[in-house]
Image (spheres, rainbow, N blue to C red):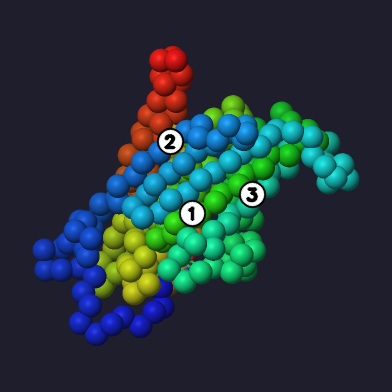
Amino acid sequence: MGMQKPPGLKLVDENLRRIDGRRLDELRPIKMKVGVLNRADGSAYVEWGKNKILVAVYGPRELHPRYMQDPTKAVVRARYNMAPFSTEERVKPGPTRRSVEISKLIAEMFSGIIFIEEFPRSAIDIFIEVLQADAGTRTAGITAASLALADAGIPMRGLVTACAAGKIDGYVVLDLNKEEDNYGEADMPMAMLVKENRIVYWQMDGQMTEEEVRTAMKMVKDACEKIYEMQKEALKRKYVDLEGL
Ligand code: ADP
C-alpha cells in the first residue's frame, strides 16, 4: 500500500486478469502440511503463493514465571516473526512495531477461540515464523497457526481460517500478492470461524467504500470456506499417513 505505482503499470488487464494471471476472485496456490516438527507439541507448514510459513505450538504447559499465571485460564501468547532472509531487503532481526502489533492481535484472537478456562495457570505459545514473505503473511500465518493448535490437540471452538481481499486499479480482488499490495489502494486481512460463520479478526489498510468492503468481505468469506476444506484435508492427511506406518 502507498507505494508510487510505476507509470504504465497495470495491475488488472482488459480481460480482468491480474499480473500473475489470476482472476479477481482467485486465490494463489496453497499447500499445507501438519505435524512437521518433532519437538513442538503441534506444528504446521504452509506455502501460499510465494509465502512460506512455519508454525510451532507449545502447551498447554505450566506458565513461568508463576506470577504471570492466571488461576482461572490459560494465557495465550503469540510471536509473529519475519526471518531476516524472508524479504528482498534483509529484515533487521528482532521485533518491530508491525510484528509486535500482529503478534498481539493474533494472541488475543486465539484467546477467544481456545477453551482457555480448561487450562488454569498454563501457557499456550504460538510461534509463527515467516520464512519467505510475499504479502498476506499474517493471514497465512493465522491459517497455519490454527492447524498447529489442532495438531497439538488443544481444544478450540473450531479452526480459524484467514485470507485478505483488497483493491487494486479500482477493482476489489482476493488475496493480494506483494506487487498488488505495494501499488494497490487497500488491503483487508480477515479471519473467520467458518463453522460458526463468524468474523474473528479484521483489519484494513488503505481506503474502500462501504460497498467495496462488503464485496471484499464476501470474497474473503467464500475463499475461507475453500481454505477451511484444505485445512481439514491437511489434518486428515496426517493421520492417514500415520496409519500407513
Ligand atoms: P501481510 O504480509 O500480512 O500482508 P503487510 O501488508 O504489512 O502484511 O506487508 C505486506 C508485505 O510487505 C509482507 O508480506 C512482506 O512481503 C513485506 N514486508 C513487510 N514488512 C517488511 C519489512 N520489514 N521489510 C521488507 N518487506 C516487508
Residue where numbered disc 3 is placed? 78
- In front: mark 3 or mark 1? 1
Label 2 within 8 A of ligand 1 by Cβ: no
Q: Nearer the viewer, residue 182 or 42?
A: 42
The answer to whether residue 183 is left or right of residue 128 is left
For marks 3 and 1 on the same chain, the one whose residue lies earlier in the sequence: 3
What's the residue type where badge 3 is placed?
Answer: Ala
Task: Return the x and y of residue 224 as percentages of the image width and height.
Answer: 38, 43
Q: Residues within 10 Å of mark 3 (few under 14, many from 20)?
A: many
The x and y percentages for residue 116 are: 69, 35
**Observer-nearest of 32 and 87:** 87
Q: Is mark 3 within 8 Å of ligand 1?
A: no
Q: Secondary structure at mark 3?
A: strand
Say which amino acid is labelled 1.
Leu
Q: Quadrant of residue 93?
A: bottom right
Q: Is residue 209 visible?
A: no
